[in-house]
Image (cartoon, grey):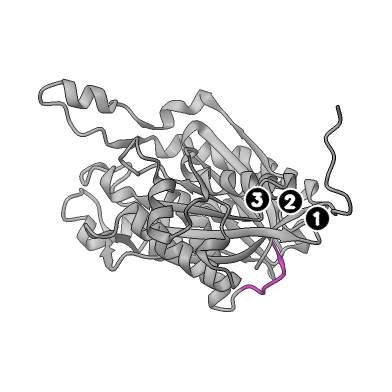
Amino acid sequence: MQISRPAGERARYGRILGVGGYLPRRIVTNEEICRSLDSSDEWIRRRTGIRTRRFAEPDETTAMMAAAAAGKALAQAGLTPGDVDCLIAASMSHLYQAPPLACEITGLLGTTPAAAFDVSAACAGFCYGLAIANDLISAGSARHVLVIGSERMSDIIEPTDRSTAFIFGDGAGAAVVGRADQPGIGPVIWGSDPKGLHCIEQRTSWKDAGDTAGEAWPYLRMSGPEVYRWVVTTMPQVAQQALAAAGLEAADLAAFIPHQANLRISESLAKALDLPAHVQMARDIIEMGNTSAASIPLAMERMLTSGEIPSGAPALLIGFGSGLGYAAQIVTLP
């Protein structure tokens, strides 16, 4: 039996219709970080480009921040929570295994009875969610999909750890994906390299932490130099594949929005891609730190709101992180 589309129905394409973000109230400087860390403002800036980051207060939960960001994205798209058919939440710092973060967000946002599920793909989570949303739209399984990255990285980093303490920040970013007459989200280029599982990991399980007397909190650990080498040697090819899959060249882009892992990484990728001067690159890492799955939608919203990049133009997104998982795609900016 062959399954066919309803009579008279055209092929469906997905496109980002609106974006939104939420940043916690508390701004944390390098000087504050260094009260618990053997480092300096000069060293942190030189190694990562980071000057400040945001840390969430107790009331700024992953679900609360996600709902706030999603509400802004819906408003920009001219939609209401009732228009959402599916909600995808990406996070590596949500501390509850159940219920899913996405289901908690539906309750706060009022998108019930939308389908809701979480994506666990670390810093590539937003790009993974975007690819899934695009496929849901194309298959006819949904009309409008919310994709949200929300992180409280401050909960899973040890203040005295020189590999992580100064890098990460908190926040949430969201995008609404809906139907379009022309493709607005290019084919995703994604994958993983499990040889690097140890590079960014939680070395102690929650069970071990609970069962073993005196066991430390299972903080995130990272081998920064190994991650840096992996990204700058492998991600340029992934980015080029995403451009080719969309039928574009670097000169056709208006924006390059990589995961905000490290300013030196972003600049190395831009150089490897030989991006022309007119292509604007996200540098939110400087003020926001690394917000994992939230970094790409947060950067996209800021660049659009500030007028740094134009609506309707193509942008290259690329996320990468623990796993070592990655994903890249070209999108038409909302």
Q: Which residue is under mark 2?
A: 186
Image disc number at residue 149: none
Marked residue nearer the N-terminal end (1 or 3): 3
Residue 248 bears which disc, if any?
1
Q: Position of residue 98 (x, y in %)?
A: 34, 36
User: Residue at coordinates 34% horizontally, 35% vertically from top-left?
Assistant: 97
Amino acid carrying label 1: it is: Leu
Q: Residues within 10 Å of mark 3 (few under 14, many from 20)?
A: many
206, 105: nearer the viewer? 105
Between discs 1 and 2, the one toward the N terminus: 2
User: Marks 1 and 3, how far apart in space?
Assistant: 28 Å
Type of the residue with mark 2: Gly
- Is residue 109 in view? yes
Residue 262 rendering spot, x and y as whole percentages: 46, 52
Q: Which residue is mark 3?
A: 142
Q: Secondary structure at mark 1?
A: loop
Residue depicted at 33% across the width and 48% down the height: 153
The earlier-in-sequence mark between 2 and 3 is 3
- Evaluate if marks 1 and 2 touch, with contact meaning CB atoms under 8 Å apart: yes
Residues at circles 1 and 3 in contact by the CB criterion of under 8 Å:
no
Residue 121 lies in the magenta stretch: no
- Looking at the image, the residue that sits furthest to the bottom is 307
